Structures are given as C-alpha cells and as structure tokens.
Image (cartoon, coloured by chain):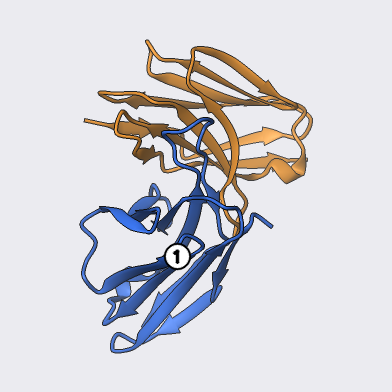
Amino acid sequence: GQNIDQPTEMTATEGAIVQINCTYQTSGFNGLFWYQQHAGEAPTFLSYNVLDGLEEKGRFSSFLSRSKGYSYLLLKELQMKDSASYLCALRNSNYQLIWGAGTKLIIKP
Amino acid sequence: ETGVTQTPRHLVMGMTNKKSLKCEQHLGHNAMYWYKQSAKKPLELMFVYSLEERVENNSVPSRFSPECPNSSHLFLHLHTLQPEDSALYLCASSQSPTGDGAGELFFGEGSRLTVL
C-alpha cells in the first residue's frame, strides 16, 4: 500500500530551528513535495526532492532518504509568519500524489 | 496571487440546490485538478484533466460533475449535496508531471462550501 505519516502539530519558538518529519511507504517513487498552507489560504509549493540528500532554499531545507522512506523539512530562524500547516506529498510511479494530513506548526514569541 | 482564481470563495447551499464552482488559471498549464480538503484529513483528489481530457476520477459521487471547456477553465457542478460534502474545494493546475521539472501544483484560494 501507500501511506504518508507526519506529526499532527508542532510548537516552536521564534528564532529557533524546527524539523518536520515525513515518513512514507510506497511501491514506486517519483519525487517528494513539501507545501505550506496558511490558515484560510491556498497551499503553496516549497520544495521537491527526487534524489537523496539535502535541498536548501533560504531558511528552508528539505531532505530525502529513499532507502528509509523518510523526508524532513527544516525551518531555520523561525518567524511568526512561518505559523502554518506543512503538507508532505509523495508522487508515485503512476505520477499520482499521495498526501499526508499536514503538520500544523505553531510559532511562539 | 498564485495565478489560479476560484469563485465563489464561500458558498452556502441547501441539499436540493444546484450550484457551480469555477476555476481559471493564467499560467499556461496543461493539467487542472479538483481537490477536497476536510479538517485534519489529507487532500482528496477528485478529478484530473490533462489537455482538457479527464484522466482521473477517484470514485467521486455523481452529485459532483466536472467540466473542462478549455485548458484554462474548470468547473465543478454540484447538485443534491449532503452535509458531509461541506469542505474546502481547491482547484490546482500544473505542467504535465511527466515533462521537465517538478510539475508542482499551483492552487487557488479555494471555495468554502457549506451544505445545510
């Protein structure tokens, strides 16, 4: 089968670093995505990993290990505006997206 | 502004009403999608159109009827809905994921539907 797990909610402090994990099981793999969704707004694309390793984009980085079925999104120098839900999505060999339920990140001053 | 516009943003309807959701993309993409988003649940893919042809229909009840008249416009026609259909309906577009690049989705702001 195919499924994705990510924590339901996380809390972090402004200025700190937080890592949001995503584990998955799939019979075929064609990339892993992270999206950010602020309350009441559209999800927006953050990152895409298809090869193992770390992809860095400013304060945000995304890591993938295909052998472990594992990805994480790392957010550095947290700002209040980073309070949002973060969605992990796997693209399988049929180019279908399998979505996690999202991780609600709460940033405290 | 994501380049994908949805109307209406909010809709309240009775179970016997007929209404339509509209989506328009200004990105030149060749695929469009309807998703249902319910609280604390993963996004549920409803329909996919690629080059105006429906390529995926995920066992969606017939009370939801999609229409894609051209590559820039997508509709979701609603009739005799149930209260459990209340949710956020998101439209998205992308370039074909089988081509170059990630083929990431660009979402509209969504239409918040309440069925009484």
> In which image quadrant can residue A29 be found?
top left
Q: Where in the figure is residue A62, as x and y percent of width and height?
A: 58, 23
Task: Identify the image quadrant of the C terminus of chain B.
Answer: bottom left
Task: Identify the image quadrant of the N terminus of chain B.
Answer: bottom right
Q: Where in the figure is residue A68, as x and y percent of width and height?
A: 38, 12
Q: Relative to residue A52, is residue A56 drawn left or right?
A: right
Q: Where in the figure is residue A102, as x and y percent of width and height?
A: 47, 42
> In which image quadrant can residue B62 be found?
bottom left
Q: Amino acid at mark 1?
A: Asn
Q: Residue at x 76, y 35 (%)?
A: A14
Give B100 or B62, whichever is nearer the viewer: B100
Which residue has dot 1 on it?
B70
Identify the colour of chain A in the image. Answer: orange
Q: Relative to residue A59, is residue A40 drawn left or right?
A: left
> In which image quadrant can residue A69 be found?
top left
Q: Where in the figure is residue A22, as x and y percent of width and height?
A: 45, 27
Q: What chain is colored blue?
A: B
Q: Is residue B105 above or below residue B107?
A: above
Q: Chain of mark 1?
A: B
Q: Residue at x 25, y 74 (%)?
A: B63
Q: Residue at x 75, y 43 (%)?
A: A80
Q: Residue at x 46, y 40 (%)?
A: A8
Q: Is residue B87 above or below residue A78?
A: below
Q: Is residue A52 above or below residue A50?
A: above
Q: Is residue B36 above or below residue B15?
A: above
Give B8 or A5, whichever is nearer the viewer: B8
Give A103 or B8, whichever is nearer the viewer: B8
Instruction: Identify the secondary structure beneath mark 1.
Output: strand
